[in-house]
Amino acid sequence: MYDILVVGAGTAGLSAGIYGVRQNKSVLVLEANIYGGQIINTPDIENYPGIAHTSGFDFAMGLYQQAVGLGVEYRQARVTSIEDAGDHKVAVLEDGERIASRTIILATGAKNRPLGLEHEEEWVGKGISYCATCDGMFYRKKVVAVNGGGNTALEDAEFLSNIVKKVYVIHRRDQFRGEAARVEKLRARENVEFVLNSNITALLGQDRLEAIEVTDKVSGEKRMIELDGLFVAIGQMPENMIFSNVVGLDQGGYIIAGEDCRTNVEGIFAAGDTRTKTVRQLATAASDGAVAALAAVSYIQDKEMSA
Ligand SMILES: Cc1cc2nc3c(=O)[nH]c(=O)nc-3n(C[C@H](O)[C@H](O)[C@H](O)COP(=O)(O)OP(=O)(O)OC[C@H]3O[C@@H](n4cnc5c(N)ncnc54)[C@H](O)[C@@H]3O)c2cc1C
């Protein structure tokens, strides 16, 4: 029986591990792929407080080594379901193994919805980004496009229009899902051009993104736009359905939990990108990891006192 079982070894999960072991608790972190999470392939991180510049790989490696060095137990294993057995919780692995723990922290992150085009994965960090807050500054005074029609896409376009030469906003419909006021604000900007009713149908370049092919859905006409960067903002996909029989999810599939990281089930916490929140970044994931681990510790202590 572990004190804290963490599902996911991204920034939130490993931070939770660090805070858990430093409270003298036994912590097991289970990771389906490789430790590090979403950030692992990013070449440049420049907004993590205290680290002026690092790569996603170095960042993830540092976090992993720190966690394991402090005594966090790490295993590569995919959790396929969790169970609430009242005084303890159970994580069930792909091969059927069951691991019991007093508390569980779900830190399973989220994936950016991809366009599904050739070269997309290969050119992440080479002209393709899913995060304007993270990578916008690398495109200062350059030409970029934002793809999407929700508030995230509109916010990204607004933010980018302050620092880049030109922003194309490419959306598959003629109306935006995002707030009308944001759309109007963007329309008023001289360096923003809307390309509506249009899909990106090809990513073009040699070793990096140099242009995109955009197809008008109404006329079928194709247009090539030369640019330095493309920000894909067509949504995120948390993978939490496997937990939906135990914890509450919102419509987008995020685990419902506030800044205290508590879910609707006592002893089960959610940390990082996987929970309902507005800012999904490394700093907020690390912060959630700390909050969730300390909440788990205090839950354990309360249980011990009342036993
Ligand atoms: C390309 C890119 C660049 C970015 N750049 C920056 C940046 O410069 N600065 C910044 O602040 N933020 C950046 N971000 C955002 C940042 O990476 C995320 O906010 C952060 O990684 C969230 O951490 P997390 O631990 O919540 O989730 P994740 O990093 O997504 O980690 C979740 C982990 O859980 C694992 N997992 C999922 N389901 C299971 C399961 N069932 N069983 C076991 N394991 C499971 C996953 O494999 C994954 O390793 C970037 C994101 C991307 C995609």
Image: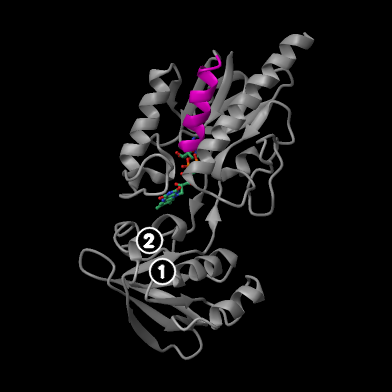
At x 38% / y 86%, what residue is drawn? 222
Query: Is residue 36 magenta-colored?
Result: no
The residue type indicated by label 2 comes to Met
Quarter of the image for the N terminus: give it. top right
Residue labelled with disc 1: 163
The quadrant in which the C terminus is found is top right
- The answer to whether residue 66 is seen in the rendering is yes
Disc with the residue nearer the chain's start (2 vs 1)? 2
Q: Position of residue 183 (x, y in %)?
A: 59, 77
Q: Any atom of ligand 1 within 8 Å of the CB at mark 1?
A: no
Near-viewer residue (26 or 280):
280
For the residue marked with disc 1, what is the amino acid? Ile
10 Å crowding of disc 2: few (<14), some (14-19), many (20+): some
Q: Is residue 98 left or right of residue 47?
A: right
Range shown magenta: 11-23
**Residue 93 seen from this side:** no
- Circles 2, 1 touching at the beta carbon (< 8 Å): yes
Q: Look at the picture and state if 252 lies above or below 171.
A: above
What residue is shown with label 2?
A: 137
Quarter of image, res 142? bottom left
Q: Position of residue 86 (x, y in %)?
A: 74, 21
Across and down, in percent, residue 34 comes to 38, 35
Q: Nearer the viewer, residue 92 or 305?
A: 305
- Secondary structure under tag 1 reads loop
